Each structure stands twice: as structure tokens, then as C-alpha cells.
Image (tube, helix red, strand yellow):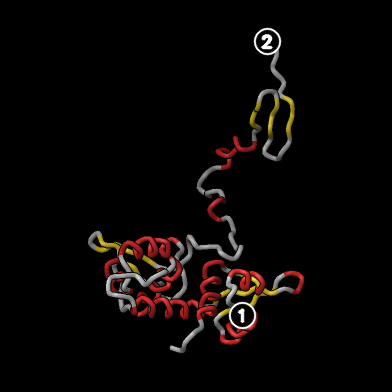
Amino acid sequence: MTTILPATLDVLRHLRLHGRQTTQQILKAVPTAQARTVHNLRSLGYIDSLPLERNSVAYTITAKGQRRVAQAASKAAAQAPHGQAPAMVSHSDTEAAILAVLGRASGPLSVTDLARRAHIPEALVRPAVTMLVQSGQVLTRTTRKVPMYRLPINGTAPQGRRPYPTGTYDGAELRRNPGIGPERFDAFALPSRVNDRLHWPDGRETPFKTPRA
């Protein structure tokens, strides 16, 4: 594995955590990086460019870049004392180390196995792997009351709950369930009364007429 400069690795970590970023945003977040750092990462295939409005460009980390971050985290964990996490390991690095271990594993692993192979305490592995499951990057199943974890077989995250770091959230969780009849939503079209005013869902306000006795 070739040596990678700390600033270059910090750029990859930043993109992995924050998603799509312009060069200006990257250099502001990683002061030790330079514009040529971004250019070199693009040339090596660690990041990819996306066109934006007004002829500007943003960058996202590629699968190759994800693997490079995971390799660096795994190497740092292997160099730490047994049973201890390397100093100043971020949550992102912990996730990357878990993904690297699962990528090398021949079958599902438990939290204990992950902690032992990544040389990271279970107290750090457990919440990290839970977040990876929730984001769809890791699959889980329970065997004899012990959760086991593995990567998706085809290397891609399954459909379902996914992270939306680049502004692509489609609001699927907020859509109406097809099994619920439209009549059950009639109340949402009615106004709310505040004193002598009616506040409608579309923003209108109308006076409330008190019925005569």
C-alpha cells in the first residue's frame, strides 16, 4: 500500500463524512490541503467531480477512495496496542476499520470478532456498526441471540433506510402508506382555531364566526 499524505487522507475523510463539497469548502475544512491535492485525488480516481450551477464543480469520494480510507484506518488500528483503539481515532475511522475487516472476512462476524480483528474496543465498535446497519452499508442477522454482521453480497447497500449526505433525500418516509384510505387524512385539510381566527394548512387565516345561540 503506497504512502498517502495526512492532508490527502483528511480530504478523503472529509468527503466521506460530508458528501459533495466544492474545492473552496474542502480547503476551508482541511487547511493543510491545497488545490493540487484535490486535483491529484481526482486524477487518481479517489474522488469524482460533479457539475453544479454557474459552471462550478463539486467533488464526492469514490468507492476507491472509500477503500483507501478503510485501509488507512485498518493499518492505524493494527499498529495500536492489542485491545486498544489508536489515539485520536474518529467515529469515521472506526466505521472504516469495521468495513475493512468485513471486507476481508469470509463470513459474518459478531461485535466481539470485529473488535478483536480491528483492535478496537467493543464499546466503540458496537455503536459504529449499529450506524452502519442503519445506513445500509452493513447487513445483520441474529444467530443464537448473537447479532452477526456482513457486507452486502454485491458490494452495494440494500434498498431501505439510507444516508443522504449529498442533498438527494426524496422524502420516501413521509409519503402516505398505500394501505391507509384517503378519508383518514381528511382532518389534515381542516383549519386550526386560535382564539377567533382559523389557520388553514395553506397559510390562509380567516375569522371564526361564532354561531348564534
- SS state under label 1: helix
Q: What quarter of the picture does the N terminus occupy?
A: bottom left
- Residue pushed farthest top? 213
Q: How many marks?
A: 2
| Residue 163 % position (x, y) | 51, 63
Q: In the rendered structure, find residue 213 and report the number of the disc placed on it.
A: 2
Residue shown at the point (29%, 67%) measured from the top left: 110
Give the left or right position of residue 78, taking residue 17 as reference.
left
Q: Which residue position holds label 1?
A: 38
Work out whether residue 148 or residue 59 is closer to the camera in this orientation and state it. 59
Look at label 1 and name its amino acid: Val
Q: Is residue 184 above or below residue 38?
A: above
| Residue 209 % position (x, y) | 72, 21
Q: What quarter of the picture does the C terminus occupy?
A: top right
The crowding category of the residue bearing disc 2, from other C-alpha atoms within 10 Å (few below 14, some 14 to 19, many at least 20), is: few
Work out whether residue 122 or residue 158 is closer to the camera in this orientation and state it. 122
| Residue 141 % position (x, y) | 32, 64
Work out whether residue 14 or residue 111 is closer to the camera in this orientation and state it. 14
| Residue 41 % position (x, y) | 58, 83
Residue shown at the point (56%, 66%) measured from the top left: 18
Residue shown at the point (51%, 73%) measured from the top left: 13
- SS state under label 2: loop
- Residue pushed farthest right? 54
Give the left or right position of residue 4, taking residue 122 as reference.
right
Q: In the rendered structure, find residue 99 and report the number of the disc placed on it.
A: none
Residue shown at the point (33%, 76%) measured from the top left: 80
Look at label 2 and name its amino acid: Ala
